[in-house]
Every structure is written in structure tokens, then in C-alpha cells.
């Protein structure tokens, strides 16, 4: 089976983890601090705070910015549930917005009247999601936010190494990253809050550790969201390889996009650097599921991220968080992610292209 994702764990990672185990210090310690420093330096951020997951990073970042009870936060309707769950866990309420046709990122400037209607006196922030590794239009989003005095907390969990207009995501403002096993680099589970605001960073450090300002002195309601030394050791080894792996993803994406027929291939906007956490095609004409099944029958894992928009999720329906988001809804019916990870061999890429191009399901679809 050609898997949709494959963590790359080599001798360097194994030795780093073994050294952490032998050190006798397993909870948050010097390796976590070293990982934070290296990550901040790599992405041009002033501060980095390591936590236990990407979701924890989002919750803590929102809370560190003072988002909570009674606040509303704009979130794209087409994203992984964690993007909006984090808003709820922070005590606020997500308000959904539609996405762009070309890159599936939040669209607050295409239909300005609709976007304005989503903003109320309770709106405090935007959580733009750099979905599949393609960055949002941060120029437009910052303009929209500044005009309305809104905070931005970026969900960059799928976009480690992406950039907009030459600025790496995470080098400005506050952004959150995930190191889950399927991400471009992994610590098994883990996340990072990066910010240029020292006060936010300090609040995040308190919030990740039971709300303790000093040892056993609790000032904020929180929990245990610390990163382990084992995870940090793995992350340090992976970070050194990230740029090379991202270039491999981009090369694999370019190779596939030149050869695939019958599907709409991913687009990279001129000001963007896409890192292809997922290589996501669109299959118009209702043929997406048939193509998925055809690929799987040939040993190629293909997954539709995501089959349900947030307003179609049972939780959000129970909470009365809904609306009509036609672009997001079309995307949910048509997207299909194909393997793109750097462990793919040339023969794997050729098998993927042959399987897609030979699929009968695509006879009525158009080329992207």
C-alpha cells in the first residue's frame, strides 16, 4: 500500500530519543527549551512555547490573547474540527465563514458584505487556517482585522515552512503548529505556539503548566499541556531535516501536477509558498468517491480531507452553529488527497499518476 503519510524516523531520531531516555529527565526540561529556541530561530519568531499537541497550542494561544467567555471567533467552515474545537475549549464561540475556491483558505474579502455580517460587537479574533500547507492571504486578512480591531491567531498546523510574500508563517503575530505523526515533521504528538508578543508567550508558558506562575502557585485555570523531553528530542532531529523534506514534497507535487489528467490539481498562488502537507485534487462531476475506491483497489491510499464541513458536524449542529457556505460545501464533496510525502519513490509517483489517469471514474471530469 502506498500510504497517504509516512513518518521518517532514522538513526538520528532513534539516538536522540535514546539519549533522552537515558538522561533520567523525561518531563519538560532542557531539551524542550532547546527545541523551542531552535524552532523560533528557524522560523524567525521571537518566542516559541512547546506544548502537547496542535490543539493545545490553539487553545493556549487564544487564551493567552484573552479570548474567552462571550467572545466570537471567525473560523473557516472547511477545516479539521480542531480549528473550531479550540475556540470552544477556550470558552468562546466559533462563527463560520466560507473559503476560497482556489486554495480553500478563509475568505473574508471576496464577499465583503457577507463577511461584515459575520462580525458582531462580540467578535474578537480570526483563526485563519493554512489548509493543506497553502498559506492564507495574510495581507488581506491583516487589513480586514486591523480595520475592525480583531486579533489573528493562525492555525498553521498543516503549514510548517509555508510562507506568504516571502515571510515565513509564524514569523509575525501568533501562529500554532502541530507535530502529529502525519505532519511534515513529527514529535509523535506535540505542538508549538510562536509569537512576537512577549506577554502572550509568558501567558502561554503559564497556561501549559496548570496555570502556575511559579512552582505550586496557580494563578490561572488550566491543565497539563507540557511537551516531554522525548518528544522534544525527536523534534530537534526532525527540524534539521524539515527544509529538505519540504522541498521533496514540492518536487513530488510538481511532478504529479504536470502529469495528472481528469482532476483539478492544487494551485499555488503567486505570493504563496505551498508546502503540500496534503496534495489535494478536486474531482468534479460526483466522481470523487469512485476515484478513491479505484485507487485503494490498486494499493494507493487516498483520503477526502474533509468530507463534512464544520456546520454539518453533529457537535456544531447541536450547538446551533450553522449557515450556508457554498464554496466549502462543494469542496467537501470533491476534494481527494493523494500521497505526496518525501518517502515516496519515483515508482510510487508513477503508480499514482497511472492510476488516476486510467480511472474510468474520471471520464467526464475536466483537467486542472
Image (spheres, helix red, strand yellow):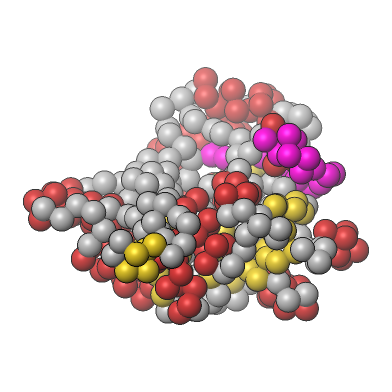
Numbered-mark total: 0
User: What is the x, y in percent for residue 281?
Assistant: 64, 43
User: What is the x, y in percent for residue 8?
Assistant: 31, 46
Q: Nearer the viewer, residue 60 or 35?
A: 60
- Relative side of 181 to 147, left or right: left
Whether residue 318 is in magenta: the answer is yes
Q: Nearer the viewer, residue 201 or 166?
A: 201
Residue at the spot x=56%, y=59% of the render?
Answer: 155
The quarter holding residue 124 reads bottom right
- Relative side of 347 to 72, left or right: left
Residue at the spot x=85%, y=44% of the render?
Answer: 324
- Relative side of 334 to 274, left or right: right
The residue most toward the right is 113
User: What is the x, y in percent for residue 358?
Assistant: 61, 29
The residue most toward the top is 297
Q: Nearer the viewer, residue 84 or 128?
A: 84
Whether residue 221 is visible here, answered yes or no, is: yes
Magenta stretch in the rendered image: 315-338
User: What is the x, y in percent for residue 119?
Assistant: 81, 63
Whether residue 214 is in magenta: the answer is no
- Relative side of 336 to 2, left or right: right
Whether residue 368 is visible here, answered yes or no, is: no
Q: Quadrant of the N terminus?
A: top left
Does residue 201 sit above or below 115 in this rendering?
Answer: below
Residue at the spot x=61%, y=35% of the render?
Answer: 304
Residue at the spot x=71%, y=58% of the render?
Answer: 70
Amino acid at each position: 500500500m502506498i500510504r497517504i503519510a509516512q513518518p521518517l524516523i532514522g538513526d538520528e531520531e532513534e539516538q536522540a530519543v535514546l539519549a533522552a531516555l537515558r538522561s533520567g529527565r523525561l518531563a519538560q526540561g532542557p531539551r524542550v527549551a532547546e527545541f523551542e529556541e531552535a524552532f523560533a530561530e528557524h522560523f524567525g519568531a521571537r518566542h516559541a512555547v512547546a506544548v502537547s499537541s496542535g490543539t493545545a497550542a490553539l487553545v493556549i494561544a487564544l487564551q493567552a490573547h484573552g479570548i474567552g467567555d462571550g467572545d466570537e471567533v471567525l473560523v473557516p467552515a472547511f477545516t479539521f474540527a480542531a480549528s473550531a474545537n479550540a475556540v470552544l475549549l477556550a470558552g468562546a464561540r466559533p462563527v463560520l465563514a466560507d473559503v476560497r475556491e482556489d486554495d480553500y483558505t478563509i475568505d473574508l474579502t471576496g464577499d465583503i458584505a457577507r463577511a461584515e455580517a459575520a462580525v458582531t460587537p462580540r467578535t474578537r479574533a480570526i483563526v485563519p487556517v493554512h489548509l493543506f500547507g497553502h498559506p492564507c492571504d495574510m495581507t488581506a486578512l491583516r487589513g480586514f482585522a486591523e480595520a475592525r480591531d480583531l486579533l489573528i491567531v493562525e492555525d498553521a498546523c498543516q503549514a510548517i515552512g509555508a510562507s506568504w510574500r516571502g515571510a515565513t508563517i509564524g514569523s509575525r503575530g501568533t501562529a500554532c503548529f502541530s507535530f502529529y505523526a502525519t505532519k511534515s515533521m513529527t514529535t509523535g504528538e506535540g505542538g508549538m505556539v510562536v509569537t512576537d508578543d512577549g506577554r502572550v508567550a509568558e501567558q502561554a508558558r503559564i497556561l501549559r503548566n496548570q496555570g502556575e506562575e511559579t512552582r505550586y502557585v496557580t494563578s490561572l485555570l488550566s491543565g497539563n499541556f507540557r511537551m516531554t523531553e522525548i518528544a522534544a528530542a525527536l523534534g530537534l532531529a526532525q527540524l534539521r531535516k524539515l527544509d529538505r523534506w519540504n522541498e521533496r514534497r514540492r518536487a513530488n507535487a510538481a511532478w504529479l501536477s504536470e502529469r495528472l489528467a481528469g482532476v483539478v490539481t492544487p494551485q499555488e498562488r503567486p505570493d504563496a509558498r505551498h508546502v503540500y502537507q496534503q496534495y489535494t485534487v478536486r474531482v468534479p462531476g460526483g466522481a470523487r468517491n469512485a476515484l478513491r475506491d479505484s485507487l485503494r483497489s490498486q494499493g494507493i491510499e487516498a483520503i477526502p480531507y474533509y468530507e463534512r464541513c464544520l456546520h454539518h458536524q453533529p457537535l456544531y449542529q447541536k450547538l446551533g452553529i450553522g449557515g450556508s457556505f457554498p464554496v466549502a460545501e462543494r469542496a467537501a464533496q470533491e476534494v481527494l488527497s493523494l500521497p505526496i510525502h518525501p518517502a515516496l519513490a519515483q515508482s510510487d509517483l508513477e503508480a499514482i499518476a497511472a492510476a488516476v489517469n486510467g480511472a474510468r471514474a474520471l471520464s467526464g471530469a475536466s483537467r486542472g
